[in-house]
Structure formats: structure tokens, C-alpha cells
Amino acid sequence: MADKITSVIAKEDNGNIQITFAIPSDVIKSAEDETIKEFAKDTEIAGFRKGMAPLDKVKDKIPQSTLIEHSLSHVLPKALAEAVTENKLQIAIYPKFELISAKEGEAWQIRGTTCELPKFELGDYKKAVTGELAAASIIVPGKDSADKSASGQISRDKKEQIAIKAILENTKIEIPQILIEEEADSRLSNLLGRLEKLGLALENYLASMGKKAEDLRADYAKQAKEAIALDLILTKIAESEGLKIDQKEVDAALNMSQVDIKEKDQNPSETDNRKRLMESILRRRAALDFLINLS
């Protein structure tokens, strides 16, 4: 069909998935018309009552980039859903879209970059963790005394560090590049927010750390890769061990984390999403607790 959106899937070595869409000009024209009608409701043009201006004059008032962005928002969600279904994809994040070509009268080319969660095997994580914990419990005079009691008992924090290091080293898992970039961007954004509150410039912060911007980005990318891997591994361990979280525990944790949010002000779907997120966090916490108690 001439008006059917087509897509091509390409899986890259870094774990990313490229979905390239070809959107027929007729589909684009229809989406643009809908966008212009939406803008017309609030557009004020001299000589016409609000919402009554001719659509061609309304179009002239809309920046081209805005028209393209809003028109694609009418088209891409459905096109993505069809591509995901047809190719049996289980995407982990909503794609980052890039406009490749948008010539008048021709099919538009749009590229979306996303990924699936990596598939991996856990390996013998119990043996790896218990071995490392046993080795760490050996008392060596003058070494790691701050992490042990006189009887050689390892502190909880140290046990967690040992368990985390053991499962990361014992599990081969390839994290898609786009997931790493997303997490690194989030961490950088949080840092910039904190610096802004403190009235510090990023350049001064970097100078105080003796680092360049690219060094900071590389550090955050490494941290992001390990954090994502750890979350996935702990989630799989929780599934493997059949660890469950009581709903009362989830509710209690939510109440502690959002004391300033009134129940009546919460959107039901947002509340459900927060509950699912909190449950996943608690399950990973339970998996880590399980590991440090193996010894």
C-alpha cells in the first residue's frame, strides 16, 4: 500500500537496535494537517477571531521544526508499535528518534535507536560470593582492620561490596550502548543540578577534581555500565531464588519516600508505576541481602 509506513531493523554490535522508518508523503500530509488544526485553536492572527484564521496562515506562523516534531508525534507511536510487533522486539527504552530526510513530496526517513535488555547466564554466583566472603574473613594483622571485628566478622557494608564485586566479575553481560548513554546522561544532569544549587560552575568543579569534561563523561559511563549490570544481575538472582516482596513492605517504603505527596494528588497510573519501581528496588535489595547471608 502506498500509504503504509515501512520499517527496517538493524541490530548493532554494541547492543543498540536501529529502526529506520519510511513514512509516505500522504501520511505526513495528513499528520501535518492535523497538527495545523490543533495549533489553529489557539493561534491569534490579526483580522481573525482566535481559532478562526485560515489554516494556511496558521501554518505560516508555526516554526518548521515545531511542525515536523508535532506531525511525527501523530505518526511514530503507532509505527513503532507495529514495528515492535512485526519483528517480535522487546525494547527496553523508548527510542531516540532522528530525522534523516524530510523532503517535500517524498517519503520521510526517520531513524529510532533503542535496545532490548541483554540476555545472560548467571553462572555459579553462590560459589563466587561465598568464596570471596570466606577469603575476606581471614584475619591478616594490620590489614582491613576497619572492616572487621576482633573475631574476624566482616562489616555489612564490606560484605555488600564483596558480593557486588563477585557477581559482577562472575557474570558476563553486555550492556547496550544506548542504555549506558542514557544512565550517564542522567547522572551528569543530576550533577549539573547539584552544582547549580551550590552556585558552582562545571568548569570550576572539573578544575578542582583535576579532570576534563571527557574524563568525567568516561567515569560516569563506566559507573553507569556497572550499575545497570548490577541491577539486571540482582533482578535475575531474585527471580532465580523466588524472592518475593510483601505488598505491605512496598507500601511502607513508598510512604517513607513520598511523605510530601498527598494521596489525592496522585495520578493512579503514576502510583502504580511507583509501586512497581519500588517493588523492583526492594527485590534487588532482597537479592543482595540473600547473597551476603550465604556465608
Image: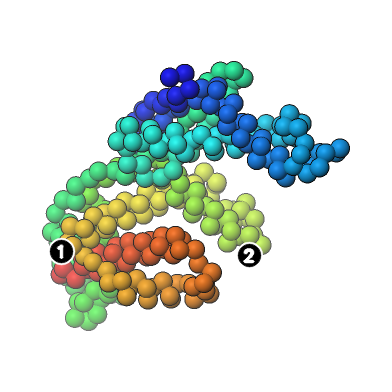
Note whether 257 is above or below 42 in the view shown: below
Q: Check the picture and name the quadrant holding the C terminus.
A: bottom left
Place of residue 87 in the rendered image (x, y in percent of width and height, measured from the top left):
31, 32
Residue 135 appears in view: no
> In the displayed image of the protein, which residue is found farthest to the bottom?
150
Decide if residue 82 is on the left or right side of residue 51: left
The residue closer to the viewer here, 72 or 196, is 72
Q: Residue furthest right?
A: 47
Image quarter in which the N terminus is found = top left
Residue depicted at 41% across the width and 71% down the height: 254
Residue that carries the numbered disc 1 in the rendered image: 130
Please state the horizontal and vertical placement of residue 36, each as a whole percent of the image.
66, 35
| 68, above or below 162, in the image | above
> Which labelled disc corresponds to residue 198?
2
Q: Amino acid at mark 1?
A: Thr
Which residue corresponds to the image point at 37% horizontal and 28% vertical from the top-left? 9
Q: Between 158 and 184, which is closer to the camera in this rendering?
A: 184
